[in-house]
Image: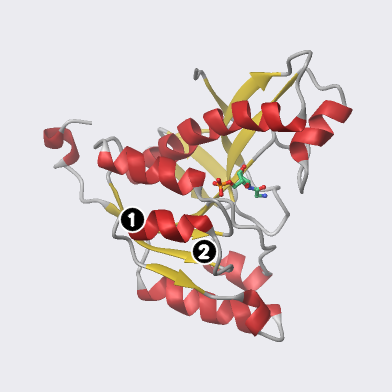
Amino acid sequence: MSNSRRGQRAALPIVVLISGSGSNLQAIIDAIRDDDLAVEIRAVVSNRADAYGLTRARAANIPAEVVDHKAFDSRAKYEAVLQKLIDQHEPALVILAGYMRILGEAFVGHYQGRMLNIHPSLLPAFPGLNTHQRALDAKATEHGASIHFVTNELDGGPVILQGSVPLLPNDDAQSLAKRVYRQEHQIYPLAIRWFAEGRLTTDAGNVRFEHKLLTRPIQHIGT
Ligand code: GAR
């Protein structure tokens, strides 16, 4: 996006939650750096102190914080602290980027309509873990990744955008994951950009793209 187009809209404040490598976080950081995404990452928060994504955040001069879920004796207490920390940064959107904790109702309700997740499958296929191996075991012909608004149903919120890859004859979980990651790194910055530009909205469980009700996920044509 050119500077003049970008100048029309203030950068959308976001907070990114991670648990691990943070390659999706990096894709978002890169898109901002390339002037392709008018958002400001106010903070990256991990539930794990050893998440490599924290290093990526610090390298980009983004505040990186840890709220270790193991330090709390209940999920409610952990999420109350997490929520307070996130809200101090006043994000318009919360991004789950490889954040591997199941979230409770109060937390999800608080961020309803302003929290996105990326999941490594073509939802509703393969919610949960080990999606690449499960796609192989099911002899699926295609696989991919989905961006969805977060609801209380695990990996079950309305899907906005998907990127697909074919399964190849010699694929194993690792080779498949690599191709799916390529899709992930394209579709997450894109969906966030749509939200930042006001093209993607949600109300009462309905998702609208450019004011039209989204009845099925948009399919990304990527490389
Ligand atoms: C990504 O594949 C993401 O889709 C997945 O975790 C990985 C994180 O990678 N998320 C989930 O499985 C959530 N249910 P990253 O830390 O390199 O972005």
Q: Disc 2 vs disc 1: Cβ atoms closer than 8 Å?
A: no
Q: Which residue is pictured at 23% across the width and 31% down the height?
A: 1
Q: Which mark is residue 59?
A: 1
Dot 2: what SS? loop
Furthest residue toward top: 169
Q: Quadrant of residue 90?
A: bottom left
Image position of 115 (left or right of 197) = right
Dot 1: what SS? helix
Q: Is residue 208 visible?
A: yes
Counting from the top left corner in percent of width and height, residue 216 is at: 62, 29
Instruction: Say what amino acid the circle numbered 2 marks.
Output: Tyr
Counting from the top left corner in percent of width and height, residue 214 is at: 55, 33
Which comes before the other along the chain, label 2 or label 1? 1
Counting from the top left corner in percent of width and height, residue 184 is at: 54, 35
Furthest residue toward left: 4
Please tell me which residue lies in front, 214 or 70.
Answer: 70
Please tell me which residue lies in front, 160 or 201.
Answer: 160
Q: Quadrant of residue 125?
A: top right
Q: Which residue is pictured at 53% across the width and 41% down the height?
A: 207
Instruction: Say what amino acid the circle numbered 1 marks.
Output: Ala
Q: What is the crowding at mark 2: few (fewer than 14 residues within 10 Å), some, or many (at least 20)? A: some
* Residue wearing tag 2: 111
Image position of 5 (left or right of 77) = left
Instruction: Examine the rendered structure and indicate whether residue 219 appears above or below residue 70.
Output: above
Image position of 150 (left or right of 139) = left
State the CA–CA distance, disc 2 to disc 1. Answer: 28 Å
Q: Which residue is pictured at 14% across the width and 42% down the height?
A: 7
